[in-house]
Amino acid sequence: RRILYALAFFSGTRRSEAIALQWGDYDDSAIPLGRITVRRTYRHATTKTDVERPVPVHPWLAHVLDGWRREGFPRHVGRAPRPEDPIAP
């Protein structure tokens, strides 16, 4: 739940967009900040406005996501995250 709240707060996404984010949507190698590409909502194949948009990742959110990917997600799910897995299961 905290990961979902951090995603929604620091990325400015709608709740249904934050829920639909997958690990494949997160590019931590983008310069100067990482990037999350918002492509869909929880119930629909596109966003509310039908516009796919890149969202820069705040350094604190990048730190939280890195820890979640390395430790939290495997502990919670039992394996490393795949690109098609939701960031906040």
Image (tube, helix red, strand yellow):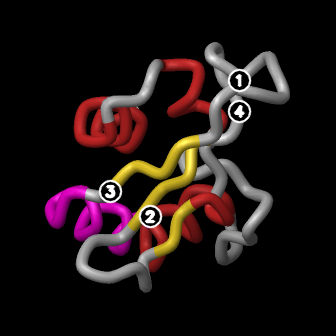
Label 1 vs label 4, nearer the camera: 1
Q: Around disc 3, counting alpha carbons within 10 Å, would you say few (fewer than 14), some (14 to 19), or many (20 or more)?
A: many
Q: Around disc 4, counting alpha carbons within 10 Å, would you say few (fewer than 14), some (14 to 19), or many (20 or more)?
A: many
**Which residue position is annotated with label 3?**
56
Name the residue: 71% across, 33% down. Answer: 40
Three-letter code for the amino acid on which mark 3 is drawn: Pro
Q: Earlier in the sequence, mark 3 or mark 1?
A: 1
Q: Earlier in the sequence, mark 2 or mark 4?
A: 4
**Which residue position is annotated with label 1?**
50
Q: Around disc 2, counting alpha carbons within 10 Å, would you say few (fewer than 14), some (14 to 19), or many (20 or more)?
A: some
How many angstroms separate mark 2 from mark 4 (CA)? Answer: 24 Å
Quadrant in which the C terminus is drawn: top right
How many angstroms separate mark 3 from mark 1 (CA)? Answer: 19 Å
Q: Farthest residue to the right: give it.
A: 45
Q: What label sits on residue 40 in the rendered view?
A: 4
How many angstroms separate mark 2 from mark 3 (CA)? Answer: 22 Å
How many angstroms separate mark 1 from mark 2 (CA)? Answer: 32 Å
